[in-house]
Each structure stands twice: as C-alpha cells, then as structure tokens.
Amino acid sequence: MRLLLLFTYGVTLETWVRKGLLEREKRIYEELLASGHVEEIFWLTYGSEDRTFAKELDKRIKVVPKPSIFKGKLCTFLYSLLMPLVRARHFKEADVIKTNQMKGSWTGVLASFLYGKPLYVRTGYTWSIFSRKMGKKSFLEKISPFIEWLAYRFARRASVTSVADRTYVIKKYGISESKVKWIPNYVDTSIFKPLRSDRYPDRIVFVGRMTYQKNLFSLFDALSGTPYSLDLFGTGELEDELRNYALEIGAR
C-alpha cells in the first residue's frame, strides 16, 4: 500500500526539524513501513526546500515539496487548492490519503473527489473549538466549522486524540460512531518510563510546547499550595506569561 500524507496547511518539513519534531513524527511512518503494510509514503509539504531533509528519512518516505513558484500566503493557499492537480501523479499512485491536521484537509477532500481515493482525516485537536477559544478571526478560522463538516463527510475514516473530541465531532457533525476512532498521541515507553529513583520525590516534569493546547495554567493551579514543584522543558508563545502566572499564584 502507498500512503500519502498531507502536511498541515503552511507547515514545512524544515519546521519539524527546527522545532525538534521530526524524530517523533517520522517514527510513526517508519513503524508503518517496518510492519510491511505500507511499502511507500509520500509526504506533501509546504516547503520549497524540504527535499534537503530527505537524507534523515527512510528512503521509502518521499518528500514532495511545494513548487518554488508558489510564494507568499496567497500563492500558498492557491497551491493547497491546486495540489491535487500539480501533484497528480502522487495522488493517483497513493492508495490512501491522510491528513496530519484539519487545517489543510480541503486538499484531501478535493483529491479524494477527483481520484476516488479513500481519505483518512486525522486531527490532534479540534480546530474550530481552538479557534473559538483563542478568539482567532482569520478567514480560514471563521469557516473552520464548515471545513470540519466537509472533511468528516468525505472521510472514509477519521481519528481524534481525545475522547472529548470524539464525542464532540460525532454530535456536532452527525457522524457515525464507527467512523471516528479515538487514537491518543503515542509515547515511546522505551524512553519515557518510570525510573527506579527517589532523588526528587516532590518534583513533576513537563516536556512539551508551551501553548494553550497543553492546558498548563490548569496544571499550575493544581500545584499551587502543594509541596510539589514543576520543571518545564520546552518553548512556546506562553513562556513569559507562564512565568508570571507561576509567581502570581505561588506555584513552584
């Protein structure tokens, strides 16, 4: 089987490398190749120079970058609409089309319609809920509920990473329960596992991005007034805000 992965709209392979995500993200696809169920994978990205990172991948993972003529935000959006035609050979060769997030899923919908390929819609969070909570008002974010409705209608299968998201999309968009699976984000337990150590019995560690999706303010609230301290490893747009909030509530 050949699998085609659509990167999140606007996201490049260079972004994955720069943010330290590549090792974790590629592991899923390396496991699929090792299983023998998938023989080749196409990664369709939004970076014009992304092939330069192909040396860090299994040779059976083919990086298909955005053509350099599509420069700027408007042309990038145009490419997301034309991708099924510009990269027609890859879509025709693929047996399954998969999204990495909801943002950009319209490309998969168009390709599925044009070539009759099954579409698997995978999301790590519910875009419309996140946009509403964050008060984001771009055109795409305003129409995110429609994009979600369209993607779930065309999807052969879909998966979300939380039970709450599964319940929401089934109820909101009237999708069959059998169509939407709950598949949590994976943890490599060969690396992240309990250690036989009592050096720091009163400390908790968080490793990840400092963003609203991670719900770190609630974690700070839970630890406030307790004897436990929290060590955070990562970066993100909330770093300064989290530092100030920790001082404000007395979390350590």
Image (spheres, helix red, strand yellow):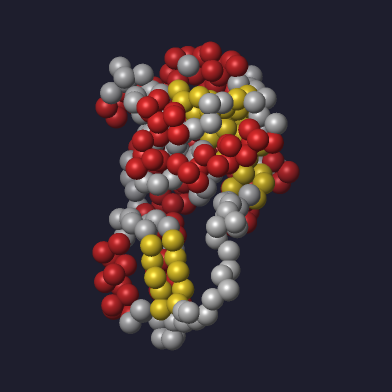
Residue 70 vertical position relative to residue 29 in the rendered view, above or below: above
Quadrant housing the N terminus? top right
Q: Position of residue 70 (x, y in %)?
A: 32, 20
| 129 and 11: which is toward the camera | 11
Q: Using the rendered view, name the quadrant where residue 10 is placed.
A: top left
- Tally of numbered discs: 0
Residue 150 vertical position relative to residue 69 in the rendered view, above or below: below
Q: Position of residue 65 (x, y in %)?
A: 41, 24
Q: Residue at x 57, y 32 (%)?
A: 98
Is 194 displayed left or right of 52 in the figure?
A: right
Q: Position of residue 130 (x, y in %)?
A: 44, 52
Residue 26 vertical position relative to residue 132 in the rendered view, above or below: above
Residue 244 vertical position relative to residue 67 in the rendered view, above or below: below
| 198 and 230: which is toward the camera | 198
Q: Is residue 77 visible?
A: no
Q: Residue at x 48, y 44 (%)?
A: 23
Q: Position of residue 150 (x, y in %)?
A: 55, 33
Is 83 displayed left or right of 238 in the figure?
A: right
Q: Using the rendered view, name the quadrant where residue 244 is placed.
A: bottom left
Q: Residue at x 37, y 27 (%)?
A: 52
Q: Residue at x 47, y 51 (%)?
A: 129
